[in-house]
């Protein structure tokens, strides 16, 4: 499994931030209100120390009890207002974040389902899960705890500094004398934690990819007795994940005590200088109230500085996740252009005109393929593994784009046809049947409410699957669990037949449709296939030549090229590729 390494870049990536802010547009009214609340928080925070200074110097010093009580009531009211503003700020910014990540997940999933299969061939599924779940979640923190909270902290710092200089610039300079040390410590912490969190995101992505891939392929791991080796690999990846987190924990455990010491040093210098000033009050103008207010100011000042460093980490993780999401959304190379023609009725003529195709640019798996299949005609594709049989099916469904030539349905290039309309008219039964963890009904309709139970049962009767469905608890409501674990391989194959036939397709594709079933089920399916092929263009892929002898035409493929074509009897008489395959297969049976 290829491990992912992504560099986070600079924290202030304005291109990424600009793209992130585009997601805010639908909620700009609420976002502007959050900005107003942020401004209010910045103003309200430094007012309390000033009121306490006023109370100490004006009322407490002269024993004015009731005036002091009135100011205390004002402070309590101010705290209530500040708490309400803080609540609204946190709640509304959190709501905006949740709406935004909902929109992004929808946009991201919509983008994923438009991508060609080529993209999924080269991208681990676990990595895409990380993009859709974990990375989007970090983007939520950018809005709820990152940008808005950092803006509030910065405004508080600005207003606190303004009030401090306005009250006493000398005390302010003394209070801020340790700021260079704080800024240096914060900068070093910021740089270290940026690397650590980037390693964490990479480790999470690699861990998700490994776990998803190996749980899906657990039967292979166990069949080949590879549990110990795969477990050792998992421990190594998990160790990298742990070490990445431990590095971030180390930087936190070092930074915050240092920040507390630097803040305490600033407070100590302030008390020392202020106490000297109080002794010589007439010359310095420093009062007890002023000193107490500055002690409060410096505490309020250093708190957002420490928090900004923490917010930075949130923002940094959000930027890393956001850049990955944006890169995925912006990648249009694997999106299949959709045609605009929606035919009212497809008769089923299929034509491959000198088609060349390669999964990568170097190796062609189909070379100059030309086929002309008439409506209602049945053709069979035979050949060794890797001859290109399944690739022809993939191209007909437009899962991949051809390199040269053209593919036409009813004389229309499939590039011009609406992809959904094209695929709706092609019923496909694959050798490897995939079923979702849901009911039989859902696995047949895939959530299409236009498909009724009557349509499902009619298709089930056609393929001879009605009895087995009726015997299941709940019938169509029976849950087959993940990948159809609670039903047999043959029953899964029957469900795939129903799924293909329920839409009454004009073109039927059978890719090794009976290779995974027992002889009794195969006989039943062969009878169903005969009914299904009636009045439909049919393309069958089979290794067992006995299943396709009645085909109108048999196409023999070898290394991506058509070697022979004709009926069963014609090909046997020519004593070529097909005749050799026929002799080999029946020799094995004998």
Image (cartoon, rainbow, N blue to C red):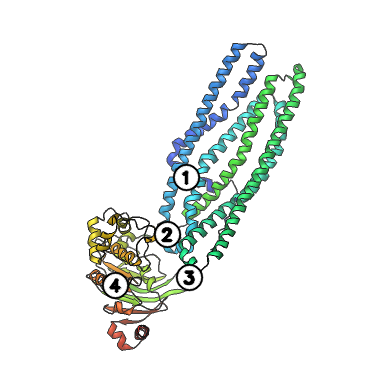
Judging from the image, what secondary structure is the residue with disc 1 in?
A: helix
Marks 3,1: beta carbons within 8 A: no
Q: Earlier in the sequence, mark 3 or mark 4?
A: 3
Displayed quadrant of residue 151: top right
Q: Earlier in the sequence, mark 1 or mark 2?
A: 1
Q: Which mark is residue 171?
A: none
Q: Residue at x 62, y 29 (%)?
A: 160
Q: Residue at x 74, y 29 (%)?
A: 269
Q: Position of residue 206 (x, y in %)?
A: 54, 57
Judging from the image, what secondary structure is the residue with disc 2 in?
A: loop
Q: Is residue 289 left or right of residue 508?
A: right
Neighbor class of circle 2 (other Cα within 10 Å; few <14, some 14-19, many 20+) is some
Q: Earlier in the sequence, mark 3 or mark 1?
A: 1
Marks 2,4: beta carbons within 8 A: no
Which residue bears the numbered disc 2? 115
Which residue bears the numbered disc 3? 361
Is 88 in front, or is 356? 88
Q: Earlier in the sequence, mark 3 or mark 2?
A: 2
Examine the rendered structure and indicate whether residue 385 appears above or below residue 328.
below
Q: Residue at x 49, y 34 (%)?
A: 34
Judging from the image, what secondary structure is the residue with disc 3 in?
A: loop
Distance (Cα) linking label 3 and label 1: 36 Å
Q: How many marks?
A: 4
Q: Which mark is residue 22?
A: 1
Distance (Cα) linking label 1 and label 2: 23 Å
Which residue bears the numbered disc 4? 520
Judging from the image, what secondary structure is the residue with disc 4 in?
A: helix
Q: Position of residue 534 (x, y in %)?
A: 22, 70
Looking at the image, can residue 518 be seen?
yes
Displayed quadrant of residue 58: top right
């Amino acid at each position: 499994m290829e491990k992912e390494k992504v560099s986070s870049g600079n924290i202030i990536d304005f291109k990424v931030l600009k793209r992130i802010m585009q997601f805010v547009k639908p909620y700009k009214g609420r976002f502007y209100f959050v900005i107003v609340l942020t401004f209010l928080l910045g103003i309200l925070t430094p007012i309390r120390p000033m009121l306490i200074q006023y109370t100490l110097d004006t009322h407490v010093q002269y024993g004015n009890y009731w005036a002091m009580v009135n100011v205390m009531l004002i402070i309590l009211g101010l705290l209530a207002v500040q708490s309400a503003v803080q609540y609204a700020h946190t709640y509304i910014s959190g709501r905006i974040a949740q709406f935004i990540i909902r929109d992004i997940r929808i946009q991201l999933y919509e983008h994923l389902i438009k991508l060609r299969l080529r993209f999924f061939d080269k991208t681990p599924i676990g990595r895409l899960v990380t993009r859709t779940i974990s990375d989007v979640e970090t983007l939520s923190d950018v809005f709820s705890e990152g940008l808005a909270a950092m803006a509030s902290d910065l405004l508080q710092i600005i207003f606190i500094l303004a009030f401090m200089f306005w009250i006493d610039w000398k005390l302010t300079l003394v209070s801020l004398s340790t700021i260079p040390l704080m800024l240096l410590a914060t900068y070093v912490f910021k740089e270290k934690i940026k690397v650590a969190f980037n390693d964490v995101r990479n480790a999470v992505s690699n861990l998700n990819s490994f776990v998803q891939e190996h749980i899906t392929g657990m039967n292979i791991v166990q069949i080949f007795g590879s549990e110990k080796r795969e477990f050792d690999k998992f421990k190594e990846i998990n160790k990298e994940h742990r070490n990445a987190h431990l590095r971030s924990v180390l930087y936190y455990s070092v930074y915050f005590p240092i920040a507390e010491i630097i803040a305490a040093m600033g407070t100590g210098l302030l008390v020392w200088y202020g106490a000297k000033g109080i002794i010589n009050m007439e010359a310095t103008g420093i009062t007890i109230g002023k000193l107490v207010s500055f002690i409060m100011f410096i505490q309020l000042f250093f708190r957002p500085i420490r928090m900004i460093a923490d917010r930075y980490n949130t923002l940094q993780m959000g930027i890393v996740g956001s850049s990955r999401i944006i890169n995925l959304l912006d990648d249009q190379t694997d999106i299949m252009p959709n045609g605009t023609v929606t035919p009212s009725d497809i008769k089923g003529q299929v034509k491959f005109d000198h088609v060349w195709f390669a999964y990568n640019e170097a190796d062609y798996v189909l070379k100059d393929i030309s086929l002309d299949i008439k409506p209602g005609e049945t053709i069979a594709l035979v050949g060794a593994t890797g001859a290109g049989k399944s690739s022809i099916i993939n191209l007909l469904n437009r899962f991949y784009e051809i390199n040269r030539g053209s593919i036409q349905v009813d004389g229309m290039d499939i590039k011009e046809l609406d992809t959904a309309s094209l695929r709706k008219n092609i019923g496909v039964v694959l050798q490897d049947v995939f079923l979702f963890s849901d009911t039989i009904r859902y696995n047949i309709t895939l959530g299409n409410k236009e498909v009724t139970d009557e349509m499902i049962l009619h298709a089930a009767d056609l393929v001879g699957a009605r009895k087995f469905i009726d015997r299941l608890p709940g019938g169509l409501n029976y849950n087959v669990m993940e990948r159809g674990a609670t039903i047999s391989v043959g029953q899964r194959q029957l469900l795939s037949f129903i799924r293909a036939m329920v839409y009454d397709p004009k073109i039927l594709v059978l890719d090794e449709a009976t290779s995974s079933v027992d002889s009794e089920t195969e006989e039943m399916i062969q009878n169903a296939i005969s009914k299904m092929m009636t009045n439909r263009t049919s393309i069958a892929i089979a290794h067992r030549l006995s299943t396709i002898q009645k085909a109108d035409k048999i196409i023999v493929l070898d290394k991506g090229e058509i070697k022979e074509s004709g009926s069963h009897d014609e090909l046997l008489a020519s004593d070529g590729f097909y005749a050799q395959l026929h002799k080999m297969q029946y020799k094995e049976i004998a």
